[in-house]
């Protein structure tokens, strides 16, 4: 089996920083900015400046593969089409909506539905109509997973939340445990699966305490605890642990579908009240933040406002010299400033003092990256093969097995972003160069 010998590494979680304060609802920012980009797909805008919009109204369309609508997250007026910083690290066009604070709902929301009459195809259609994407970071359109022709035995909820600092899933689950179970039960129906499993790290005892008493009302759903190692939240790792099978392409090949816990919670509202994907929880944390915490916000909320609500920056930190990470420190993207906006894939923004520049300029040959690699690759050798454009050597070094967990970069004493080199090597193989 591909992952029979996969290993993990214990790393400092630093999660207690953002668990100390309760989940903070910030539902009425003065403006939201809906980016006209999802994953790498440009969106088609269908509103104009001056248009009045309601919460849940369709304002843009994703066309082609993964086609689905994108919805307004607040009610108000479209006041501009302007460029904003995106979690991808670049500026993209966005729809600016000035919030009227009236919380007017689109007429499609709260339409009464007899949930018991919904077929598998009805549930999948609801995913698409709601613009539901994976909230774990990938942003893949959820409905596409459920259109698989493979027989599905189990729907797995990934609540492992592997990366340091991030606690948005933990906080959301503990705020809405019943919604998680309801959402999973609907996902099981959409997959025609008899079994549902919620995977989480063993030290998150609150998750177990809040979910376990409710399981009696949800036959077929069980909890699964994983060790506190990184990257225990890797999709293939979880699928193999739970199903005892592996796969080459998609989890469906092993009879499984994997969704993030936040996706399941949103789906509970999609099914019960026709509320589309319009909000999410985001962690604002790091040594540069005074009061790290989690915020429940409409999509398009400026991150800068959330940093201010978290007490702002610590006194010793110059914001112009801060290190901003969109996403987790292992797989996230370094960004220049705090002007970005919350989108469906942005689960956290980490703010830290800029790393010490007094580091070794080149590889020391220490081998820490190879020791840490969960799938036993030698990242430095792959880097050298890439620099030589030796695709045969890249293939022989099994670069295609890289899961891009970021551990090699994390442990490197020279602070080399070696995971970037391995990712480029994988891309070289994919293109057949």
Image (spheres, rainbow, N blue to C red):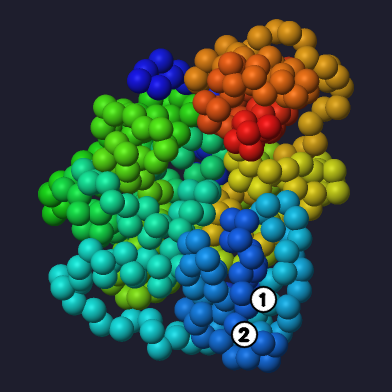
Report if the CB atoms under discs 1 and 2 are less than 8 Å apart: yes
Q: Which residue is mark 1?
A: 95
Q: What's the residue at 38%, 81% (across, down)?
A: 109
Q: Is residue 28 left or right of residue 304?
A: left
Q: Residue at x 50, y 61 (%)?
A: 65
Residue reaching furthest to the top: 366
> How far across and down, in percent of the image, does residue 125 sit?
33, 69
Rendered position, 394 above or below 93: above
Give the mark, 1 or 2, whose residue is nearer the N terminus.
Answer: 2
Q: Residue at x 24, y 46 (%)?
A: 152
The secondary element bearing badge 2 is classed as: loop
Within 10 Å of disc 2 (Cα), the crowding (few <14, some 14-19, many 20+) is: some
Say which of 324 and 241 sits in front: 241
Specify the quadrant that holds the C terminus: top right
Residue 287, position in %: x, y?
A: 69, 39
- Which residue is rendered at x = 63% and y = 33% of the image? 432
Q: Which residue in the protein does label 2 denote?
A: 47
Q: Position of residue 4 (x, y in %)?
A: 37, 18
């Amino acid at each position: 089996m591909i992952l029979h010998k996969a290993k993990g590494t214990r790393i400092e979680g630093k999660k207690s920083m953002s668990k100390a304060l309760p989940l903070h609802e910030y539902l009425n920012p003065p403006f939201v900015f809906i980016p006209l980009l999802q994953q790498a797909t440009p969106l088609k805008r269908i509103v104009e400046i001056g248009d009045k919009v309601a919460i849940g109204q369709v304002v843009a369309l994703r066309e082609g593969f993964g086609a689905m609508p994108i919805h307004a997250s607040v009610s108000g007026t479209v006041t501009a089409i302007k460029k904003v910083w995106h979690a991808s690290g670049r500026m993209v066009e966005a729809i600016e909506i000035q919030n009227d604070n009236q919380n007017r709902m689109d007429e499609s929301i709260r339409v009464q539905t007899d949930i018991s009459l919904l077929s598998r195809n009805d549930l999948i259609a609801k995913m698409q109509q709601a613009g539901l994407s994976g909230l774990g970071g990938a942003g893949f359109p959820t409905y596409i997973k459920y259109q698989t022709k493979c027989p599905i035995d189990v729907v797995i909820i990934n609540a492992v939340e592997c990366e340091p600092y991030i606690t948005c899933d933990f906080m959301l689950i503990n705020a809405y445990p019943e919604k998680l179970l309801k959402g999973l039960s609907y996902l099981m129906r959409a997959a025609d699966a008899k079994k549902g499993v919620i995977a989480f790290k063993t030290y998150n005892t609150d998750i177990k305490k809040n979910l376990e008493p409710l399981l009696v009302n949800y036959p077929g759903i069980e909890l699964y605890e994983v060790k506190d190692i990184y990257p225990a939240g890797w999709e293939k790792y979880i699928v193999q642990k739970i199903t005892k099978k592996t796969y080459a392409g998609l989890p469906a090949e092993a009879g499984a579908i994997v969704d993030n816990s936040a996706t399941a919670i949103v789906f509970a509202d999609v099914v019960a009240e026709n509320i589309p994907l319009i909000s999410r929880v985001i962690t604002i944390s790091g040594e540069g933040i005074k009061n790290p915490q989690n915020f429940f916000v409409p999509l398009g909320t400026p991150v800068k406002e959330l940093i201010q609500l978290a007490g702002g920056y610590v006194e010793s930190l110059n914001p112009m010299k801060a290190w901003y990470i969109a996403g987790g420190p292992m797989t996230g993207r370094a960004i220049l400033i705090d002007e970005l906006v919350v989108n469906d894939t942005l689960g956290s923004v980490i703010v830290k003092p800029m790393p010490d520049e007094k580091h070794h300029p080149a590889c020391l040959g220490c081998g820490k990256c190879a020791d840490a690699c969960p799938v036993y690759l030698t990242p430095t050798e792959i880097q050298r093969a890439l620099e030589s454009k030796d695709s045969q050597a890249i293939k022989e070094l099994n670069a295609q097995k890289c899961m891009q967990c970021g551990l090699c970069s994390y442990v490197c004493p020279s602070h080399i972003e070696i995971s970037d080199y391995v990712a480029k090597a994988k891309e070289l193989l994919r293109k057949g160069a």
